[in-house]
Amino acid sequence: MTTARADAVHFPAGVDPGDVDLLEEVSLPAAWAKRWAVEPSKPTLWDASNGWATRGDLARRTKTAAGRLYGAGLRKGDRIILSAAASVDLVVAHVAALRLGLIVVPVNGAYRRGELAHIVGDAEPRAAVVDNHEWVRWLAELAPEMTVVSPQLDLEDAAAPSLDQLGSRDPALLGYTSGTTGVPKGAVLTHGNLLAGADSVRIAWRWEPEDRLVLALPLFHMHGLGVGLHGTLLTGASAILLDGFSPDAVLDAAAAHDATLFFGVPTMYNRLAQSDRVAELSRLRLCVAGSAPLSADLHRRLEEAAGVRVLERYGMTETIMLVSNPYDAEHRAGTVGFPLPGVEMRLAPDSGEVLVRGPNVFAGYWRRPEATEEAFDHEGWFRTGDLGELDEHGYLRLRGRAKELVISGGLNVYPREVEDALRTHPEVDDVAITGTPDEEWGELVTAWVVAVAGKSPTLDGLRSHLDGVCADFKHPRLLHLVEKLPRNALGKVQKHLLA
Ligand code: MCA
Ligand code: AMP
């Protein structure tokens, strides 16, 4: 007897999962080039400065851009930082880099000099596409030989070599993340990973060429880039790129452009639920949430106010998308659903840690064999650091994390990094960072501080100490002064006792 695959629930009726090869098209650039050769006048990406770019525009502009990057000396395997507000220009630079075989390093533009310096030192990029003047100065200091350009790629025109010559094992992207522990590491995602990641959600969410996505997520994280942008281009669909989020901007764009899809983090849905226009969400075919837990209460409020049952899914930088509620069956509040097409999942028997395998799972951490070895068990299952359980219907429910991580507004904050920075504050003797549950942000970064005798540090004081050291979203929003931190026999702070 054969057991049904757990991902079978995501396939349309009549499709045998065994017949689907997520890697059939080998790489996203190869698949995109094929789409663009058909119906070149089809509107594909819209932004406020340029209006619509068609498939033909993308084919032509990415070829020109690839030529310029090649002319600037960039070659297959070279790293290139990409960090700018979402725009068609940025997409063109990103796609051109992938077509040429460069390894894209997307970086959050809110990072301060030290955070950027770590990535520059680790990834050793030869070029950077940035829209932030402060960064241009920092990069000139950190790596004077680096080519630094704006998203318009104002470089000399040059002939491109033949493009899209990629194997599915070739590295495509370094996604910086701290994994379960330690300093930010580059998760090496191959062209096969990016393709499988986008194709699995294309199938599961019945993404069609007629679909139009309102994309208000930044393009420097997997949610906006690996799902929103890559999925749109793979499907041959279209997207409206917004360079920031507000409920009005999303709902205006949905109305003006007849959108059918919206993907967002729970903080965005919380703000939409508070808008008096929330009922307008019902014009969309599908609303997807992820990057942090969507509370069952918010799920219910959105259903009551807009008649929308948000579809929640679960992903990670290292794996792109992993698990999703099923399109054709119940979107169950408080759960993330079933493994996506091609993803195998199991729960570690002792801890309940979610373990995964599949063509979407990254190749390892950039130049960190030990961290890579720790991240996989002896049978090649990737340890996510998330703890889960299956509910009575077989849906995965995430019930916590084995890793130390605070998620604020869909952005990850690693307590260790903030603690290390705060320990250098002259009035701080000891410190622990935790997340306090919050309706809008999911979690608020919270500092538990033992003050130096006779001193009384303030929240503002701590925040200004972090100015210029780490990005604003990592700064504590709450402060508790305590006499001492609860530590176990090994000296490790018992954070579950801080509440
Ligand atoms: C902005 N601020 C934040 C955050 N964002 N503080 C804490 N957490 C945040 N996430 C700061 C601003 O710097 C500002 O600081 C203050 O909060 C208020 O800004 P506001 O205008 O309200 O914020 P916003 O600009 O509207 O941004 C909120 C946001 C944004 C739209 C929710 O954070 C966002 O786009 N988040 C999504 C991130 C994302 O793409 N995550 C996916 C990771 P001040 O007042 O001091 O100036 S990929 C992932 O997790 C995996 C793969 C997955 O499963 O998807
Ligand atoms: P990142 O390292 O930025 O890729 O963040 C990945 C982490 O975000 C996962 O390991 C989870 O802890 C968390 N995450 C993503 N989606 C969800 C979700 N739907 N519910 C709960 N946590 C999530």
Image: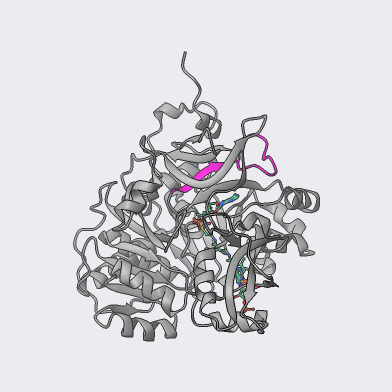
Is 140 placed above or below 276 here? below
Quadrant in the rendering for residue 144: bottom left
Q: Within the magenta stretch, is there residue 151? A: no
| Image mark count | 0
Is 27 positioned to the left or the right of 257 in the image? left
Toward the top, the furthest residue is: 1
Can residue 108 be seen in the rendering of this structure? yes
- Give residue 241's position: percent from left, percent from top: 53, 65
* Magenta segment, prevailing SS (helix, strand or loop): loop
Task: Please tell me which residue lies in front, 157 or 423.
Answer: 423
Is 285 placed above or below 9 here? below
- Give residue 317's position: percent from left, percent from top: 45, 54
The image quadrant where one finds the C terminus is bottom right
- Give residue 107's position: percent from left, percent from top: 43, 68
Q: Which residues lie in the magenta part?
A: 319-336
Can residue 326 be seen in the rendering of this structure? no
Q: Quadrant of ligand 1?
A: bottom right
Is 227 positioned to the left or the right of 65 in the image? right
Q: Residue at x 61, y 56 (%)?
A: 494
What colour scheme does the image use?
one colour
- Give residue 242's position: percent from left, percent from top: 56, 68
